[in-house]
Image: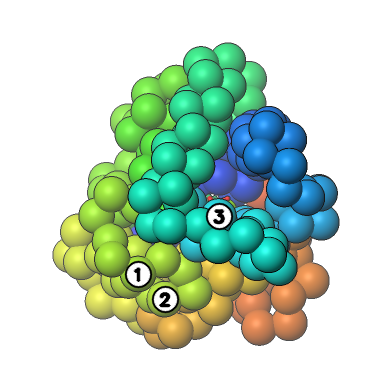
């Protein structure tokens, strides 16, 4: 059976998607750029700069690299302001019970997130102690669907890819897990993605046995 579970952060451990939405929305309103919940859905698991590129796609105006840096930095300021409101109450259903069970069984746990705000988010929700390794957006070059972040998490755990299972809420994340050669469990927005090995609306619906089975 699998030796470790690698968890995506935003959308799997904690529900920060609404804060990403509000921060992008504010930026886009200031800039007169169209933005919607539908566009926001496409940003799951995608890095900050690639998210901005997706938002600007279809805009007639061409933005210089410097202008794009400024837009991304502004969005992040709004987002970090909203993250101040995060508390352990924002931990998603089933997460804490699953982490406790994995710890009791001696199964390794890691984070594999595209977010550069990962350390701050873990501090705010107080779950840092459950994770043996953290791989995040500060440590990688290529974001999901590239497998880099999950391969880094496995390396930090001292395990091979096939010994790990990934839990994801984004299609890009499921693709990244499969590209890494890992088992993939899909929750939330990714729950209907056909490529995943295990599926559930949230972590309450995914049993440990099912998750760890080879
Ligand atoms: P930041 P995950 C991802 O986190 C989010 O799903 C995605 O919406 C966001 O753009 C990305 O992190 C980058 O976040 O701006 O904080 O660096 O789902 O991979 O944990
Ligand atoms: Mg996610």
The picture places residue 13, in percent across and down from the top left corner, at: 55, 41
Is 96 situated above or below 196?
above
Q: Which mark is residue 52?
A: 3
CB contact under 8 Å: marks 2 and 1: yes
> Is the CB of mark 2 within 8 Å of ligand 1?
no
Q: Residue furthest front?
A: 61
Q: Which residue is drawn at 28% across and 49% down?
A: 138
Q: SS for tag 3?
A: helix
> Is the CB of mark 3 within 8 Å of ligand 1?
no
Q: Residue at x 68, y 32 (%)?
A: 30
Q: Residue at x 39, y 75 (%)?
A: 147
Q: SS for tag 2?
A: loop
Is 59 situated above or below 132?
below
| Residue nearest the observer in this picture, 213 or 165 | 165
Q: SS for tag 1?
A: loop
Q: Nearer the viewer, mark 2 or mark 3?
A: 3
Q: Which of marks 1 and 3 is in front?
A: 3
Residue where numbered disc 2 is placed:
146
Q: Is residue 117 visible?
A: yes
> Is the CB of mark 1 within 8 Å of ligand 1?
no
The picture places residue 99, in percent across and down from the top left corner, at: 48, 41
Dot 3, crowdedness within 10 Å: few (<14), some or many (≥20)? Answer: some
The picture places residue 39, in percent across and down from the top left corner, at: 75, 57
Residue where numbered disc 1 is placed:
142
Marks 2/1: CA–CA distance: 6 Å
């Amino acid at each position: 059976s699998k030796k470790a579970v690698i968890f995506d952060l935003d959308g799997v451990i904690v529900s920060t998607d609404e804060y990403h939405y509000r921060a992008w929305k504010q930026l886009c309103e200031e800039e007169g750029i169209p933005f919607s919940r539908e566009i926001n859905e496409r940003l799951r698991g995608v890095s900050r700069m690639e998210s901005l590129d997706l938002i600007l796609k279809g805009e007639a105006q061409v933005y210089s690299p410097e202008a794009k840096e400024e837009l991304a930095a502004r969005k992040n300021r709004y987002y970090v302001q909203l993250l101040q409101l995060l508390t352990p109450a924002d931990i998603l259903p089933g997460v804490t019970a699953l982490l406790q069970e994995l710890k009791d069984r001696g199964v390794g746990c890691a984070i594999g997130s595209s977010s550069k705000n990962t350390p701050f988010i873990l501090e705010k929700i107080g779950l840092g102690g459950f994770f043996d390794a953290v791989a995040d957006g500060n440590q990688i070059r290529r974001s999901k669907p590239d497998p880099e972040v999950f391969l880094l998490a496995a390396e930090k755990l001292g395990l091979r890819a096939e010994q790990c299972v990934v839990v994801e809420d984004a299609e890009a994340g499921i693709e990244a897990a499969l590209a890494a050669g890992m088992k993939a469990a899909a929750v939330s927005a990714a729950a209907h993605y056909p490529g995943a090995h295990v599926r559930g609306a949230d972590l309450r619906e995914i049993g440990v046995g099912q998750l760890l089975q080879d």
